[in-house]
Structures are given as structure tokens and as C-alpha cells.
Image (cartoon, grey):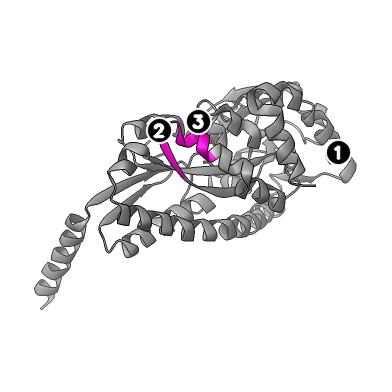
Amino acid sequence: MKVFKGLLSIAVAASMSFAADYVIKFSHVVSPNTPKGKAADYFAKRVAELSHGKIKVEVYPNAQLCGDKVVLRKMKFNAVQMAAPSFSKFTGLVPQLALFDLPFLFNDDNHLHKVLDGEVGQKLLNMVNKKGYVALAYWDNGFKQLTDSKRPLIKPEDAKGLKFRVMSSKVLIEQFKALGAIPVVLPFSEVYSALQQGVVDGQENTISNIYTKKFYEVQKYMTISNHGYLGYMVVVSKKFWNKLPADMKKVVKQAMKEATEKERVWAKELNDSQFAKIKAYADKTGKLQIIKLTKEQRQAWVKKLRSIYPKFYGMIGKDLIEKAIKAGE
Ligand code: LMR
């Protein structure tokens, strides 16, 4: 009986893996226990259910398959079918997406979602669609915080002379230059060791990335600055999409709609619960100081960093920036 059951499960597993007519390799760089990681897994599950096994989504987290820069290239020739890089990673392709990197642009989540779900968001999706991808959705992560190992960052001048890892984005580079700091572009998979070895002194990221990649264990200070937003555009290889029959496209779109709704909730939940975990570590070990800025202190960062906007009127478009600001009024 045991042998029979064993054979049966092998046969079922084999028939399932052979049954898929389409395989989607979904590559991302973060941990599975993040908003993007959870949503990618949920999307895979829903696609399998809705397509009755005809489409199999294989999720590769933690840059197992490749980093974000490479993935956008691979998708062009359908070597990878899906990814959800952060906006900053698209800016080499569609510079206007650097809009989201502008420091202190959004008042809160509501303001941000108005922009993503409105005219500006649609415009940017269309721009990416023209570049050999099919843009399916926006996924949230959250607002970025500053961490470093040298001194508490309370005033903008405190960042002077420090090296910060940044994603590849002209706005992010300029942001740290405005502080008199030294930006260093590095892929996400190299951040932990760069911090640990002192190649850079600090970095900016969301709570979920700081927590799941343990950046807080190799940093001494974390300033709750909420200075910039980190979000994602979920894209499919156009080559792959064009070969997908209409009924299967419908399935993918439906699963994406469901995953996107859940993703927004997870982003908020994980931001809160993982912050509590970092705080518990800080309280327990005394190895991390968490700095909450007063209104006046934060205002000094706002003033300093918003001063870079005019430099990007040409690249992003003054009208786009103004529309995004107006959505929050
Ligand atoms: C980063 O490189 O810091 C982020 O883009 C990682 C991610 O995908 O959240």
C-alpha cells in the first residue's frame, strides 16, 4: 500500500509538472517574507489555480536567478518572463520613472496611491510598455529610512562625507550629493557585505528590506526619515506575452489583480510588524540606535533634499512633477 501510494504521488507530481503548457520564471531580489516576495508567491498560486495547471509560475527570490539590471535585459529575449524591479531600476530605460525617487514628494500612502492609480501612473506604465515589456501592475513596498554605522543622522549635515549605497538612479545619486555624502551604486545582493565590510557606511531602504536582509545588524543607527518611496512595477516579457493565448492572458491579469490587492495590505502590515522586530532587537542589544526626528528636524531634511527637484525638470518633466505634487493637495 505504502509503495503504491508513493508511486501514485510521484505520478501525480510528474503529471503536474508535465501538464503546464507555459512556464513563467518570475525573478526578484528580495526575501520571500517581504511584500513583493509574498505577492509573487500568491500570484504563482492563483495562476496555477485559475489556469488549472496550464501555467506554472516559478518564483526565484533573493536574486537567485539574477539581479534587477540583468533581468530587464533577459526579459527582452524571453529568458525570464516576469520581474518586479523597483522604479529606480527602470530609470535607465524610462528616466521619467525617477519621479518616484524624488525625496519628500509624497505626503503619505494615500497621496502616493492617487498618483500611481491616476493619470501619471498610467502615463508611466505606457512608457514602459513601449520598451519591450508589458507592465501589469504597481506593487508597494514603502518609505525608505536611512541607516549608517558612523553617527546618528539628525541634521542633513550629519551625512556629510559618509558613503551611502544607492540603487542605480540619477535622482538618488543627486540626493546624497546634496547632503555632501558619497553615493555608491551597488546591486541589492551586495548591500549586506558592503555594509559589513565598511565598503559603504550606510544605505537607504524600507523596513522590510532592512529587516529581512539583516542590514540593521551591521549598522549602528537608523533614522526614521521616510524621505523617499520604494515601489515596484510588475512587468512581463513582451515576447512571452505575445505568444500567450487570450484566455491565459485573462488568467494572468486576474491573478495579478488579486495579488496586487493583497500586496498593498501586506506592505503596510510588514512595515509595522518588522519595524517592531527591529525595535525589539535595538532595545534588547543596545547595538542599534533608532532616531525619530522632531517636526523641525525633519523639516530641515525636507528643505535640503527638495532643493534638487529643479535639476530634474528636464529629465522627468516639470509637468509630471507638478501633477504628482498636486495630487496630494
Ligand atoms: C534595492 O535594490 O534596494 C531594492 O530595489 C530592492 C527591492 O527590490 O526592494
Front-most of 182 and 96? 96
Identified at 53% across, 53% down, the residue is: 35
Q: CA distance from mark 2 to mark 3?
A: 23 Å
In the displayed orientation, state which residue is furthest to the right.
296
Q: Is the C-beta separation of discs 2 and 3 under 8 Å?
A: no
- Amino acid of disc 2: Gly
Q: Which image quadrant is residue 277 in?
A: bottom right
Nearer the N terminus, badge 1 or badge 2?
2
Question: Could you tell me which secondary element the residue under label 2 belongs to?
Answer: loop
Which residue is under mark 1? 299
Q: CA distance from mark 1 to mark 3?
A: 30 Å
Nearer the N terminus, badge 2 or badge 3?
2
State the quadrant of the N terminus. bottom left
Question: Could you tell me which secondary element the residue under label 3 belongs to?
Answer: loop
Question: Could you tell me which secondary element the residue under label 1 belongs to?
Answer: helix
Asked whether mark 1 lies closer than 8 Å to ligand 1, one says: no
Q: Which image quadrant is residue 299 in?
A: top right
Front-most of 226 and 104? 104
Q: Which mark is residue 187?
A: 3
Residue 127 located within the stretch drawn in magenta? yes
Q: Residues within 10 Å of mark 1 (few under 14, many from 20)?
A: few
Asked whether mark 3 lies closer than 8 Å to ligand 1, one says: yes
Query: In x, y percent, where is residue 6?
Result: 14, 69
The magenta stretch spans which residues?
125-135
Which residue is under mark 2? 132
Q: Is residue 66 left or right of residue 326?
A: left
Q: Nearer the viewer, mark 1 or mark 3?
A: 1
Front-most of 250 and 53? 250
